[in-house]
Image (tube, coloured by chain):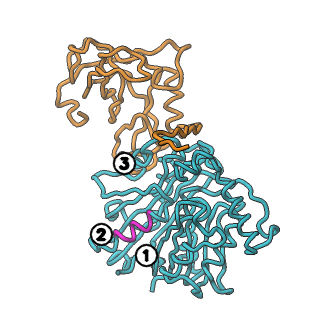
Chain colours: A orange, B cyan
Amino acid sequence: MNYAVTRMLAPVRLPFVVTPGEALSRFLSALVEGRLIGERCSECSKVVLPPRGACPTCGIATNPRDNVTVSDGGTVVMFCIVNIPFEGQTIKPPYVYASILLDGADVPLLHLVEVPVDKARMGMRVRAEWAPPTERKPSLEAIRWFVPTGEPDASYEAYKEYA
Amino acid sequence: MRDVAIASFAQATFERSSKDEVELLVDVITRARAESRLSKSDIGFTCSASCDYLGGRPFSFVSALDAVGAWPPISESHVEMDGAWALYEAWVRLQHGDVDAALVYAFGRSSQGNLNQVLSTQLDPYFLAPLWPEGDSLAGLQARAMIDAGVCSEDEIGSIATPRYGDGAAAMVLVAGPLLERASNAAVIRGIDHRIEAHSIGARDLTRSSSTQLAAEKAGACRRDVDVAVACAPYAYQEILLRRALSLTDRTRFTFLGGNSVYPYIVAGLSSVGEAFAKIASGKALSAVAHATSGPCLQQNLVCLLEVQP
Ligand SMILES: [Zn+2]
């Protein structure tokens, strides 16, 4: 018999149990309690969030003593409008995904903003809407999304370093 | 060629670590930098080693840069291999002559997956990988071939136990030119070479490590009357092949990393060079040979020859 092989299937499945590390574990545990914690670098004083156990600018270790609680309110420094559906998507496009600089942090956090897409803008003030305590898991989904506070927009000067 | 030397080395190995890669790395990089008495700004080139298949996460080497302090921006490269090959790249980079210090680091957290299985994915995707021969099965074939060829007895091979793959990180600082003149306790790399054998297991002679032998010859380490030698491989029986391929004298104190100790995959080869360096830096040896391996059944091997700073 003689026939051409045009396709072969070789399924690969590898299970992993990913552990987040010590600093990120503290951050994730705090989310369940409705708190956001960052780490203040002892050299440059910047607050890194989510914490990684090191200052990415200075390359020095941080530790639990460097933990600081960060506000759950902040400023939209950049955003995009998601128009494309993809597998695993939990909300219907279009929606707003933003880079949010929390008050007291120096690294913006990426999260959803619950706002009509034509109202999204840089400088918009927003606050976290937390999931009810019983539904919170150690993940960023403990925050449903961010909602506009109605405060006046932050000036570009106030956040341009992070945009 | 100009002299390039190892100025410092630091490592941490665990059966299983609660720290993530950045936390493991920031500790060893800080220690290696401090020991070299160089500052962040002295480092002209950085080369990292890791493998995304260990943690099941793409681009883990990018997030690992958080441990380096890559600001202002740095000149940086990466190998998806053991750290000994990152050392090789850094050695080549320092030969260019425009930078005089390099940081090399490696990290791996095998504890997050089943490495014995994961290693099947490095085999050829049409004929071998779909059969999922685990690392242990291929090691068994190699050991069988060695017994059949009369290289050693079944008793000498012992049992083929799954290596105790662990988590770890290591960092090394290299210096050249004026920074080498300023250094103390450095170990000069007199030769370094790496060679690879065919991808197909069936096309190779598994009863000897020809690539180790060739790399040792090219590095000027073969039959060398050195004080110490450090070799590494995941399986205990592989020590027999490495001792033969390196053809060292009886005087050389030989250390084998692997077998029964925790084997930090991706980090082990750089550790091997680091251990050889430590012997020289502490004054216990004037010359050393270090070996690193990668791939199934010792497919790819690196050998380097170190000597005390003149
Ligand atoms: Zn800092």
Q: Position of residue B253 (x, y in %)?
A: 66, 80
Residue B99's disc number: 2
Magenta region = B86-93
Type of amino acid at the residue the image marks with label 3:
Glu
Type of amino acid at the residue the image marks with label 2:
Val
Q: CA distance from mark 2 to mark 3?
A: 27 Å
Q: Residue at x 64, y 60 (%)?
A: B234
Q: Dot 3, crowdedness within 10 Å: few (<14), some or many (≥20)? A: few
Q: Dot 1, crowdedness within 10 Å: few (<14), some or many (≥20)? A: many
Q: Residue at x 40, y 56 (%)?
A: B78
Q: Is residue B287 visible?
A: yes
Q: Secondary structure at mark 3?
A: loop
| Residue under pointer 1 | B5
Q: Is mark 2 within 8 Å of ligand 1?
A: no
Asked whether residue B299 is drawn in magenta, I would say: no
Q: Secondary structure at mark 2?
A: loop
> On the picture, is B182 further left or further right than A122?
right
Q: Is residue B30 visible?
A: no
Q: Is B125 or B243 nearer to us in this picture?
A: B125
Residue A43's disc number: 3
Q: Is mark 3 within 8 Å of ligand 1?
A: yes
